[in-house]
Image: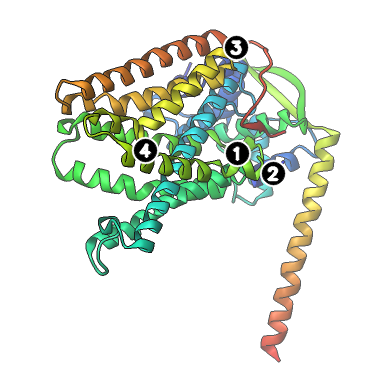
Amino acid sequence: MSLLEQRYRSVLRLLPASYRAEREEEMVDAFMELSGEAPDEVNPRPRWGEIASVLSLSLRVRLGGAGASPRFVAWGEAVRLVALLGLGYQAVGSVNQLLQWGHALAFGTHVAWTGPPGSVERLVSIVSAADLCSAVAFVAIMRGHVRTAKVMAAIGVAPTLVYMLIPMILAGPLTDRPLSESATLVFTAAPVIALLLGFHSDITPRRRSWAASLWPAAAGLAVLGGTWLVVALRPYDLDWLHLWLGFGTTILVWAAGAVVVLARRSSPPWALAMTATGLLLLAVRLPLLDNLPEGASWTMVCAQCAVLWALSTALAWMGARGLPGASGTSALTSEVGERSG
Amino acid sequence: MNITEPMFLAMTALVDEPRHGYGIVQEVDRLSEGHVQLKIGTLYGVLDRLSAAGLVELDREEAQQGRLRRYYRLTDDGAKVLREEAARMAATAEAATVRLRARTAGGAA
């Protein structure tokens, strides 16, 4: 075996074993014919373009593209569900923010949200309005418009990432920064990365109803109304209550969803997607323990983390058990999209 | 299904005879006059999609220098889809040509 063939076979190890078993020999044959004679003395290597094409093929196959085994179809479905759940969360957040801005502008309250005209705060508020693109991205993907969704999601998340990354970079090595910053960064970027990778060209997303597509608007209204109600009614001696607002409400909703997925023994992609989103929530919540003094609030955050960990573990166990074999043929019903063809 | 340029060219390469991987790469290069040079990873992604859609299928297998060589052929469904896509592209090209002709005539007047 020539050095070039040896190196190309190494590149092909990027592909899943089940795919390699089916395709490796003919891919090597085609590559070696394409490359022609290349003596070992010239230290030949596959070109970067060839390596990139294998990497791209590998990602598509691992995320349920054409030619993927049922196990990878399930993984691809899970990644797409993470994108939908994450974008749904971001959409609720951006609708909530829009309503707060509207209230501040209409009634002249909470000026800190918008800042005085011409101020830096006002500029930041205006740039932050790009968050609304996340809501557009969610509606677009629910209605089956993949390209629009990807562009809008990237625009929507960009200001947040920039605000987070610039201080992180300016303040020194990333490894010296608090864990909470990295966790928030991953939490923000993960749904967009899942959208970009999961909805590849082999996937035709399901076109859902307008009612299903617009639920974040209703949820945003409900969250805002609930928050105002709790703030208005909050007894002064219950400081821990604020831990159930905003992000805390998300944990509550996620936990209810996790119980439903477990009780109904939903498909492995649902269990895996809920595991991933649960661990993301846990990664953001856990560092809060460092910043709280021991007391009711600390205990409350501990309880939230324990719930997230316990339910995520149960979901992971259920999802892993239900996954089809690497080369199995078990049927899997797609809930997010269908493969082209 | 959305027919991309590499898919269109790969199907076109299989119209006259079954070809193996490198044969398709060569033919696509010839058909596109060097504009499209398929990488091997891209080619097999295209073949996976076309096979999954029933537009191409395995014709035969041969062993060459100890390595497997698979030949693919265009199916009847593939020929139909290719014909429709070619007609659509021809209509688009014709519309562009007509508009360019009108623009040239307008400029000359």
Q: Are marks 2 and 3 in contact (CB under 8 Å)?
A: no
Q: Distance of mark 2 from mark 3, alpha carbons?
A: 29 Å
Q: Secondary structure at mark 2?
A: loop
Going by the numbered disc 3, the residue's amino acid type is Pro
Do tags 4 and 3 sit on the same chain? Answer: yes
Going by the numbered disc 1, the residue's amino acid type is Ser
Percent x, y for residue A101?
Answer: 37, 56
Dot placed on the residue nearer the N-terminal end, 4 or 1: 4
Return the residue at label 2.
Answer: B2
Q: Which residue is nearer to you in this view: A98 or B82?
A: A98
Residue occupying the point 71% across, 92% down = B109
Subunit under mark 1: A
Going by the numbered disc 2, the residue's amino acid type is Asn
Q: Which mark is residue A324?
A: 3
- Figure coloring: rainbow
- Estimate how packed mark 2 is, as few (under 14), some (14 to 19) or many (20 or more) residues with alpha carbons within 10 Å: few
Q: Nearer the viewer, mark 2 or mark 3?
A: 3
